[in-house]
């Protein structure tokens, strides 16, 4: 079953095989949970039949190695080899470090806001003005926090070549936010490929699929 006619095409994935494999791995370790009958409540207050916690990847060596290798390979293919890898705190610090290590590159991470004490850094680590940076993120929802990290790097003098993320919901607001910010986003997997895989592997029923599709169309007001 293909969902491409009922779901929005939202962002650029690296390739179909990687997207399907990533989705399957995330479902296997419950990094992504689908529970339309008992929705989750996000920190934003949104009700959601899906919850994603990609930090779980770090606890599974084979899966974190897969993610590290896919990121490293595709970053160089899409952006060339940057000078620095930057992770967005806190979810992408671990994965970002693994990618930087594999590529033999320096690593920095970006706080949500500057520290209130000490040097009051927002970008932690050694970063020189003019260096090319690729940003690693774990999850894209609206894109707001991810793009704040991009702005912090630019304010520090970095040339941000683009961003990579493990997974995106592909909300329209995120697509528009990245377009306005002129930031190139590539992901290992996305909502389209997740639902296709979940149906094919019997993680969800046809009825649950309908619920997940409806949520995707208007997540901020779903089940209110």
Image: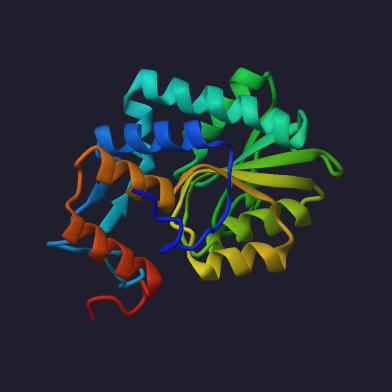
Quarter of the image for residue 151 reads bottom right
The quadrant of the rendering that contains the C terminus is bottom left
Is residue 76 shown left or right of residue 217?
right
Q: Residue at x 48, y 65 (%)?
A: 171
Furthest-right residue in this view? 130
- Number of numbered callouts drawn: 0
Please tell me whether residue 142 is drawn above or below residue 164 in the rendered image: below
Q: Residue at x 33, y 50 (%)?
A: 195
Please tell me whether residue 54 is drawn above or below residue 218 in the rendered image: above
Q: Nearer the viewer, residue 16 or 142?
A: 16
Please tell me whether residue 25 is drawn above or below residue 164 in the rendered image: above
* Image position, residue 110 (x, y; %): 60, 48
* Image position, residue 75 (x, y; %): 67, 32
Whether residue 144 is visible, yes or no, is yes
Q: Residue at x 26, y 46 (%)?
A: 199
Q: Residue at x 31, y 71 (%)?
A: 46
């Amino acid at each position: 079953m293909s969902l491409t006619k009922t779901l929005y095409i939202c962002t650029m994935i690296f390739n179909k095989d990687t997207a399907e494999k990533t989705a399957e791995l995330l479902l296997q370790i419950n990094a992504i949970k689908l529970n339309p009958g008992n929705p989750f409540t996000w920190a934003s207050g949104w009700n959601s039949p899906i919850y994603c916690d990609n930090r779980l990847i770090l606890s599974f060596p084979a899966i974190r190695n897969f993610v590290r290798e896919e990121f490293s390979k595709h970053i160089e293919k899409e952006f060339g080899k940057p000078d620095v890898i930057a992770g967005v705190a806190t979810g992408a610090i671990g994965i970002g470090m693994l990618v930087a290590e594999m590529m033999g590159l320096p690593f920095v991470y970006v706080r949500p806001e500057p520290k209130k004490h000490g040097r009051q850094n927002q970008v932690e680590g050694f970063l020189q003005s003019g260096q090319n940076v690729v940003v690693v993120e774990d999850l894209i929802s609206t894109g707001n926090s991810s793009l704040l990290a991009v702005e912090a790097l630019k304010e520090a003098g970095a040339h941000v070549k683009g961003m990579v993320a493990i997974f995106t919901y592909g909300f329209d607001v995120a697509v528009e936010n990245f377009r306005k910010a002129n930031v190139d986003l590539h992901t290992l997997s996305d909502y389209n490929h997740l639902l296709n895989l979940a149906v094919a592997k019997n993680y969800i029923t046809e009825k649950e699929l309908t619920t997940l599709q409806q949520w995707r169309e208007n997540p901020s007001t779903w089940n209110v």
